[in-house]
Image (spheres, rainbow, N blue to C red):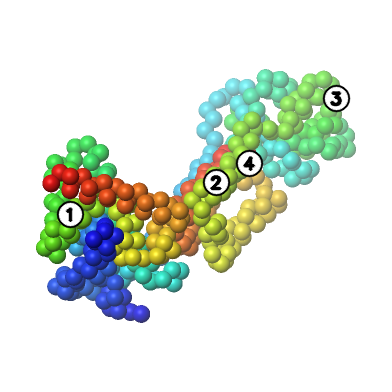
């Protein structure tokens, strides 16, 4: 008798009726799954995330400057400003807000009274919002290629001279982060690895989210709100964006877990969701 | 199909699969119970056949056990009884026949994935397609594993015969 026939005989293992009934009685005694429990768990998690975001929002911008000298303590700049719309904030936790530590810029703002004032002044095309923190007081300015506008006092200064030009160049220089390439590279690498792995395992790449694109209505609506806030209100607060990214990653994981048809797809899509969240957070942090 | 029907229909094969995958009777009972408990609690979404669905649950539970076992072996300060191997208790029906016993013991010497492929393909005589669906691997992978498993099994059985 060959091995295959012997193996096939092992399929005749008799059923143990006593064991069968014993296990069945244990299972039937178990309660039905508590659906409400999972709902409460999700609500609690969302409330916790929102609470942390609120806490960071409330405490993030508080300044505790104790210096009493007349030296400039901080200079914050915000790119993409517009005339009559001041948007800079006194914290680098806002997207686009950068703290300047340039000696020339500091010297320039310390001696700003010496600049020639403009009657019927105006700003040029390229405007940068600037907040100068001096002696615990904030002074708001808008600097352009032709003039400087003191927002608090409504005074325009003539933008002439080599020092003004140098300061404008320093402040207006686009904020290019040398690590920015990580994000597109990460997205390409992530998709390539997924494609290569599916090809290696001969898995037909399919949409892991099924037909439930409705799940993305909330993230899409949030994205629209974020862009609207950034366009009409002001710079976005990074901790809140990070919280939203984590929430988005969590939603992705839930959708993937629910709709992935095989364990391998679940595993790959889980890694992808985690990587997407990390890339989003990196993107937020570097801008 | 309600749970009672599913249980009646699939208990035998699921218990048999788990019994061949783990060497201990009590453990096999616990894992079988866990399998049907998950079937009972979870919602079947008709994305695969009910048979494939239950077999996949059983498979995940068995592999979770293997992972846990592997982890415990590496954990420091683990109590000695937790590191001990489970007591080897073959099924009474296996012990009744020398041929079955030899074959069962030879099966236990294979890698889990090889043993699993032989259970599906040679013991239960499932098709390659069904095996692929349960294991979530390609047909090529199933065929290669089956070939290597059979070769190893022949070597193990042949070696024992030589030894006698």
Please give the residue where the numbered disc 1 appears in the rendered image.
B102
Between label 1 and label 2, give the one nearer the viewer: 1
Which quadrant would the C terminus of chain A be assigned to in this image? top right
x 69%, y 37%: residue:
A78
Please give the residue where the numbered disc 4 appears in the rendered image.
A184
Please give the residue where the numbered disc 2 appears in the rendered image.
A196
Mark 3 is surrounded, within 10 Å at the Cα level, by few (under 14), some (14 to 19) or many (20 or more) other residues, namely some
x 71%, y 38%: residue:
A79
Query: Is label 3 in a helix, a strand or a loop?
Result: loop
Protein chain holding label 3: A
Mark 1 is surrounded, within 10 Å at the Cα level, by few (under 14), some (14 to 19) or many (20 or more) other residues, namely some
Of marks 2 and 4, which one's residue comes earlier in the chain? Answer: 4
Which quadrant would the N terminus of chain A be assigned to in this image? bottom left
- Where residue B94 appears, as percent x and y from the top left, is 15, 61
**Mark 2–mark 3 distance (CA, rounded to whole Å):** 59 Å
Disc 1, disc 2: CB below 8 Å? no
Between label 2 and label 4, give the one nearer the viewer: 2
Query: Is label 1 in a helix, a strand or a loop?
Result: helix
Residue A129 relative to residue B157: left or right: right
Disc 1, disc 4: CB below 8 Å? no
x 28%, y 78%: residue:
B4
Of marks 4 and 3, which one's residue comes earlier in the chain? Answer: 3
x 13%, y 61%: residue:
B97
Please give the residue where the numbered disc 3 appears in the rendered image.
A160
Protein chain holding label 4: A
Give the quarter of the image for residue B22: bottom left
């Amino acid at each position: 008798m060959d091995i295959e026939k012997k193996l096939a005989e092992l399929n005749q293992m008799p059923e143990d009726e006593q064991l069968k009934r014993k296990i069945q009685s244990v299972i039937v005694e178990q309660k039905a799954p508590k659906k409400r429990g999972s709902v409460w768990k999700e609500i609690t998690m969302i409330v916790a995330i929102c609470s942390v975001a609120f806490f960071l929002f409330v405490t993030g911008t508080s300044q505790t400057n104790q210096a009493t000298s007349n030296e400039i303590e901080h200079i914050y700049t915000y790119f993409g400003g517009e005339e009559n719309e001041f948007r800079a904030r006194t914290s680098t936790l806002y997207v686009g807000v950068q703290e300047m530590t340039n000696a020339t810029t500091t010297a320039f703002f310390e001696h700003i009274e010496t600049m020639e004032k403009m009657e019927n002044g105006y700003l040029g095309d390229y405007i940068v919002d600037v907040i100068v923190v001096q002696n615990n007081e904030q002074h708001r300015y808008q600097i352009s290629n032709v003039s400087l506008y003191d927002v608090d006092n409504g005074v325009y200064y003539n933008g002439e001279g080599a020092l003004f030009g140098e300061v404008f160049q320093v402040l207006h220089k686009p904020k290019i982060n040398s690590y920015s390439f990580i994000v597109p590279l990460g997205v390409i690498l992530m998709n390539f690895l997924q494609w290569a792995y599916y090809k290696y395992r001969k898995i037909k790449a399919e949409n892991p989210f099924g037909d439930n694109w409705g799940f993305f209505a909330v993230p899409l609506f949030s994205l629209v709100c974020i862009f609207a806030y950034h366009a009409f209100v002001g710079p976005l607060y990074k901790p809140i964006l990070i919280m939203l990214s984590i929430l988005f990653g969590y939603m992705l994981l839930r959708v993937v877990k629910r709709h992935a048809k095989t364990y391998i797809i679940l595993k790959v899509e889980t890694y992808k969701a985690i990587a997407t969240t990390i890339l989003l957070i990196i993107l937020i942090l570097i801008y | 199909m309600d749970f009672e029907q599913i249980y009646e229909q699939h208990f035998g094969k699921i218990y048999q699969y788990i019994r061949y995958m783990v060497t201990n009777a009590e453990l096999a009972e616990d894992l079988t119970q866990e399998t049907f408990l998950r079937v009972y609690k979870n919602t079947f979404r008709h994305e695969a056949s009910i048979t494939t669905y239950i077999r996949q649950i059983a498979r995940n539970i068995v592999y979770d056990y293997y992972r846990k076992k592997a982890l415990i072996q590496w954990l420091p300060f683990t109590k000695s009884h937790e590191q001990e191997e489970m007591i080897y208790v073959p099924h009474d029906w296996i012990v009744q026949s020398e041929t079955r016993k030899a074959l069962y013991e030879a099966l236990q010497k294979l890698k889990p994935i090889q043993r699993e492929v032989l259970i599906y393909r040679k013991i239960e005589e499932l098709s390659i397609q069904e095996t692929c669906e349960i294991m979530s691997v390609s047909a090529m992978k199933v065929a290669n594993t089956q070939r290597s498993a059979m070769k190893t099994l022949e070597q193990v059985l042949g070696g024992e015969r030589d030894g006698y």
